[in-house]
Image (cartoon, rainbow, N blue to C red):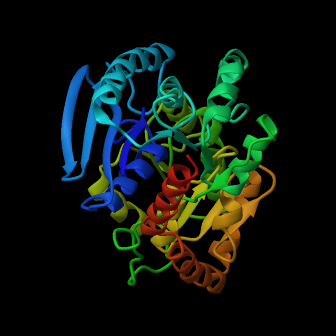
Amino acid sequence: MRLLMSNYEFPPVGGGAGQANLNLLREFAGRDDITIDLVTSAPQRGLVVEQFAPNITIHKVGVKKKNLHFWRRTEVLEWLIKAGSHYRRLVRRGRYDLAHGFFAFPTGWLCYRHASEMPYIISLRGSDVPGHNSRLGVDYTLLAPLFRRIWKSASVLVANSKGLAAAAAEFMGQLPVDVICNGVDAERFYPDPEKKLASPFGLLTVSRLSATKHIDLLIRSVGLLNEQGFDVQLSIAGDGALMYSLNNLARRLRLTDRVNFVGRVEPEDIGQLYRNSHIFVMSSTREGMSNAMLEAMASGLPIVTTRCQGVEELITDNGIVLEDSTPESIARAVRRLLDDRRMYERMCVAARKRAEIFSWRHVADEYRKCYRRVLHDR
């Protein structure tokens, strides 16, 4: 099977979708039943072709990125034009059986343009579902007709959570949407068996610093917890457009000694950051399925999260899901765990056990079944 894959995000550019793509390639690496060319991006202009594995080649079409985790419209357009030319050259020489695009737009446009040459599947990731990201309201309105054509022409649409599939149904309810959840590397992310719940209590969030993540709620909740006598430290790992304003908020609330902006963390260091923390907190109201939450679970961290897509599958007895997104509700949930050591320890064990269900090998197997089904139905 010859597969042409595309994703405008790939580490170090972007967030969860790029990480998911990377882990999927790791599972496909070395297989003799599939050959993959991936067209993706790089943060500097130019074309770089890398041999990821004997059966996998990555084509990085670069644009001058101002921020690794935030795409300006001009950057998206530049990448789409340049990647489109390279994608077209690959199609002409490649004899591919199938295309697989991460994100319905902009990546899905490449698949759609070549639908007459090969069928394609689209992995919906969140921001490519109209209504998901408030910042893109105008874009959704203008691009809705194009989105419908891309979705309708796809052989399969895949969401990474039931919640995202439901959101997709609100946009085009007549189209079926498969669900293939994210996975986690349970060998790379693991608990620290010596860690105890002791002061200072380490809260951690790993996230793009964008409006939909509502990191300001977490910062304000730290202020409330410290006012109530809890020695809490919040680490914020990630970068994004709101870094400056969130730093200002921490300064205004006099929390600079309580809130640590870690910035972008190298892949080899992120596991230790989880193990150094006590509770994973998330305040997003819009997700596909959070890779960071899965990594935290595999690291044995209880979860405190606002309700968003993905928590239906991930959170059972291993965390607290909040129906109201306020600093007060977040602070109350964290306080419950800090006040009840037995509950905390039970959730640590349950978090790891729950994470072990979600493997990237299973994700790869599900996608391979999807590929075979499309080719069988041609």
Looking at the image, is 190 positioned above or below residue 331?
below
Q: Nearer the viewer, residue 103 or 238?
A: 103
Q: Left or right: where does residue 365 sit relative to residue 34? A: right
Is residue 168 visible in the rendered image? The answer is: yes
Q: Is residue 231 above or below residue 114?
A: below
Residue at image coords 51%, 61%: 369
Q: Position of residue 326 (x, y in %)?
A: 76, 48
The correct choice, above or below, for 65 with respect to 160 in the image is: above
Q: Quadrant of residue 337?
A: bottom right
Q: Residue at x 46, y 30 (%)?
A: 117
Q: Is residue 43 visible?
A: no
Which of these two is toward me, 203 or 67? 67
Residue at image point 58% right, 58% down = 180
Image quadrant where residue 215 sits: top right
Q: Is residue 123 left or right of residue 29?
A: right
Residue 101 location, x and y as percent? 48, 38
Residue 290 horizontal/vertical position (percent)? 56, 54
Q: Percent x, y for residue 346?
A: 61, 84
